[in-house]
Amino acid sequence: MDNASELIKLAREKFGDLSTADEKVLNAVARGEVADLRSDSDEDNDPAQAQHWSEERAFNADRIAWLCTDAPASALVTHRGIQLELARIDENLDLDWARVPFPLIFRRCAFSGPISLRFAEVPGLSFVGTHTRSLNAERLKVEGSVFLSDGFTAEGEGRLRGATIGGNLQ
């Protein structure tokens, strides 16, 4: 069984039925690819309008947390990490105190809830063009760079107090 099939099997055991977006993202992360959930229409790809995006573009934050913190699942994610583009991430992303072994890359995504990375450790982090309710990354440790650019928007607070960033903050 290849890594993608194994990861999907583990996800079904954990979450039950999986959506089309779930399977697309899990396949991509197990293969080291970008999970691109964009619409065919450019006008439908604005993260500020994500509440209108279809369910086919929705990935639940609990799946991200599971991929980052469950040892058997994490072992099936490649060194390229989780790379999502133009996805709507539903619910709150809570990675407080997590030691994530791979980078987290979100390009032009929309988080419906807050992102919490307090005291987490991650090799690299990117929220380029991404929209979220808030970002709490107090005492976050990032080995490489953190990208909060090209239209990154937090409706509420964006906290990085006490964060250690080994590379650049852009």
Image: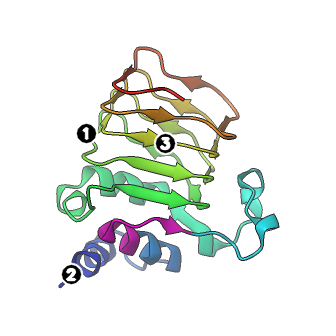
Taking 77 as reference, is 28 left or right?
A: right
User: What is the residue that sits farthest to the bottom in this orientation?
Assistant: 1
Q: Give the image quarter of residue 151.
A: top right
Where is residue 112 shown, x and y percent of the image? 63, 50
Which quarter of the figure is the N terminus placed in? bottom left
Residue at figure coordinates x 40%, y 20% from the top left: 163
The label on residue 29 is none
Q: In the rendered structure, find residue 126 and report the number of the disc placed on it.
A: 3
Name the residue carrying label 1: 99
SS of the residue at dot 2?
loop
Residue at horizontal 34 percent and vertical 65 percent from the top: 32
Q: Does the magenta stretch include residue 49?
A: no
Q: Quick one: 136 or 29, which is closer to the camera?
A: 29
Q: What residue type is labelled 1?
A: Arg
Q: Mark 2 or mark 3, which has the lower sequence index?
A: 2
Q: Earlier in the sequence, mark 3 or mark 1?
A: 1
Residue in the image at 35% along x and 47% along y: 103
Q: Nearer the viewer, mark 1 or mark 2?
A: 2
Q: Is residue 164 above or below residue 33?
A: above
Whole-percent x and y of residue 55?
63, 72
At which x and y percent is residue 43?
82, 65
Q: How far apart are marks 1 and 2 (CA)?
A: 25 Å
Q: What amino acid is labelled 2 in the image?
A: Asp
Q: What stretch is highlighted in magenta?
A: 26-36
Label 2 belongs to which residue? 2
| Dot 1 or dot 2, earlier in sequence | 2
Q: Name the secondary structure under disc 3.
A: strand
Q: Do the residues labelled 1 and 2 touch (CB within 8 Å)?
A: no
Instruction: Determine the CA span between mark 3 and mark 1.
Output: 16 Å
The amino acid type, in three-letter code, at marker 3 is Ser
Q: How many numbered discs sit on the rendered protein?
A: 3
